[in-house]
Amino acid sequence: MNLLGKILTGLIAIAAIMLLIVSLMVYATHKNWKTEADNLKQQLAEQTNENQRLTSKKDALESQLQAEVEAAQQDVRKLESERVQLIGQNRTIQEQLDTLLQQQRQNVAAVASTQANNEVLTKEVADLRVALSENQQKRDEAFKATVEATDKLHQSEGKLNSLVERNQQLTVELATKTSLLREKGIDPSATPGEIVPQVRGIVSRSRRNASGQMIEITIGADDGLRKGHTIEIYRGDRYLGRAEVITTEPDRAVARVIRKFQQGPIQERDNVATKLRVG
């Protein structure tokens, strides 16, 4: 094969390849127009159905809107009728209100007149009440004074009778007690502070301080002993001295030994006895 043959063979091979490529491209871009047409018909039917559905819905909404408009118009007509009635009622009420206001003004004037008359009557009644109260008070005071005077008179008579009777009783008691005091050797004219009960006891404790010797004895206020009473101190037949009571308790007392009467040492367990205070 010569060069020209080789060139032609190469060109044929290239042409074959180009045709193959063109065939592939044509096949890739080829469409099935029948299938596409069927799809478009189906979409058209669907859109037609949707249009019919929307049209039906639109008609229903228009019918509903028309019904609502008619109902609203009826409500408006009803409200207008009610408005007219209310205007009439309002006019009637206004007339009644004017009448009531006129009556109120007349009533206020009548009340003012009545109130003025009541004030005059009230003042007169108050004056009469004051006068009546004063008269009643004077009458009550006079009656109270009479009752009090009568009660005081009766009380005075009762007290006088009681005092006379009590005086007689006291006179008898005084005579009896005076007789008993004289029998006991006690002067009836002596004051209570000068009378010392006749009791005996012992010295339970003895101590000394700056003021002298202090003793505690076993007789006290329950035995009739009082502050200022004196006691005599002795041991057996021996007289030891005298002491003055300075404090008392129910069952004991504290006394200070009087130095000028002391005639011996005073100890615990010494005897003590009371007697009339002689100075």
Image (cartoon, rainbow, N blue to C red):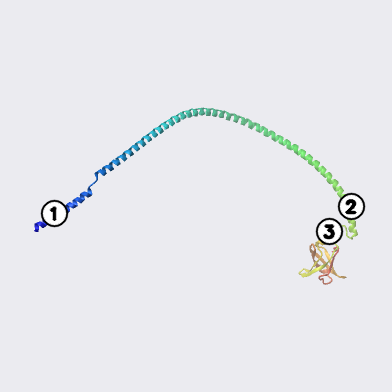
Q: Which mark is residue 192?
A: 3
Of badges 3 and 2, nearer the viewer stands 2
In terms of secondary structure, where does tag 3 sit? helix
Q: In the picture, which quadrant includes the N terminus? A: bottom left
- Classed neighbour count for the residue bearing mark 3: other residues with Cα under 10 Å, few (<14), some (14–19), many (≥20): few
- Classed neighbour count for the residue bearing mark 2: other residues with Cα under 10 Å, few (<14), some (14–19), many (≥20): few
Mark 2 — residue?
A: 172
Mark 1 — residue?
A: 12
Q: Can residue 45 be seen in this view?
A: yes
Cα–Cα gap, marks 1 and 3: 180 Å
Left or right of 179 in this view: 59? left
> Is 39 in front, or is 159?
39
Amino acid, disc 2: Val
Of badges 1 and 3, nearer the viewer stands 1
Q: In this view, does 239 lie above or below 41?
A: below
Q: Quadrant of residue 246?
A: bottom right
> Is the residue under label 3 in contact with that under label 1 (CB below 8 Å)?
no
Amino acid, disc 1: Ile
Cα–Cα gap, marks 2 and 1: 189 Å
Q: Residue 197 carries which label?
A: none
Q: Which residue is drawn at 12% across and 56% down?
A: 9
In terms of secondary structure, where does tag 2 sit? helix
